[in-house]
Image (cartoon, rainbow, N blue to C red):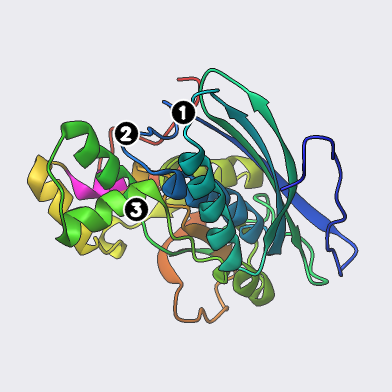
Amino acid sequence: MLGPGDDAAIIRAPDGRVVVSTDLLLEGRHFRRDWSTGYDVGRKAAAQNLADVAAMGATPTSLVVGLGLPADLPLSWLDALTDGFADECATVGASVAGGDVTRCDLVVIGVTAMGDLGGRAPVLRSGARPGHVVAVAGRLGYAAAGWALLEAGVPVDDGPLLEAVAGHRAPCPPYAMGPVAAELGASAMLDVSDGLLQDLGHVAEASGVRVELDPEAFPVAEPVAAAAKELGADPLEWVLAGGEDHALAAVFPPDVRLPAGWHVVGRVAEGEGVLVYGREIGHRGWDHFG
């Protein structure tokens, strides 16, 4: 990270074009220090921005980080936050190129991520067409299940419930699947941050189409199922509307043979919005101003 007097850095972009994404994390809204360590928060903050870059078909190269920190924040927490950023960036060969620090009443983290397209055009949200298939890569439902367990105060020591809680504290995006999808000719793609239904709604709106999902096509992972059993909840609600797992959702032409890691869950049709066959999902995802 740059020092207080620095305000610029040279960013790698061998392709000559850069994709950029930015995000904010606020203490009390996106994380709680009594639920997550500084290391967890660093990994989460890096992951959600690196996933945005991968979702455009690019390879993440660097982050720039702005921090607002309380004066009484333990130095050990900040050190752990820095380690979390470094370790998550290392999973994709990226780095923190710079940033700034200021005093604030609570922890505020602003991250800007950049990535290299490798000669490809970026994959946008507007290319889905009727007849295309919808597929997902990565985990769904973990973050929402983990948050529900923490909110309910369920004691979690080990096993599947701890896996769900870990998914809330720090997601595991399938970064490599983004460039793979772009090379295969994905017509639209994004990462699942606000819930699959909410996010695919952005694809439907941008592309002028309807997305139709088959609820039977979604496997429910053991940690999500275990949390649902513990809390008497519907695990499919978390899978379809939970968000913050930063899985990738993409649309492909029907003749594309998808590799391992991508799982077909629906199709694109004429119309608008997102339809889930045979199920009424009450919660449709996260609305930042709802």
In percent of width and height, residue 17 lies at: 86, 60
Q: Is residue 255 above or below residue 201?
A: below
> Under tag 3, what secondary structure?
helix
Of 220 and 166, nearer the camera is 166
Give the amino acid type for the residue marked by disc 3 in the picture.
Answer: Gly
Q: Which residues are magenta?
A: 234-238
* Label 3 environment density (alpha carbons within 10 Å; few <14, some 14–19, many ≥20): many
Circle 2 residue: 34
Q: Is residue 273 visible?
A: no
- The residue wearing badge 3 is 167
Distance between the alpha carbons at the discs numbered 1 and 3: 18 Å
Residue occupying the far right of the picture: 16
Marks 2, 1: nearer the viewer: 2
Mark 1 or 3 closer to N-term?
Answer: 1
Judging from the image, what secondary structure is the residue with disc 1 in? loop
Residue at left offset 42%, top offset 54%: 171
Pointer 3 or 2: first along the chain: 2
Q: Residue 154, position in %: x, y? A: 13, 40
Disc 2 marks a residue whose amino acid type is Asp
Residue 27 appears anywhere in the view: yes
Q: Residues within 10 Å of mark 2 (few under 14, many from 20)?
A: few
Q: Amino acid at mark 1?
A: Glu
Q: Does 62 sit left or right of 37 as displayed? A: right
Q: In front: 222, or 103? A: 103
> Which x, y percent locates residue 81?
51, 46
Query: What residue is at 51 percent from the left and 78 percent from the top?
Result: 258
Residue 128, compared with residue 150, is above or below; it is below
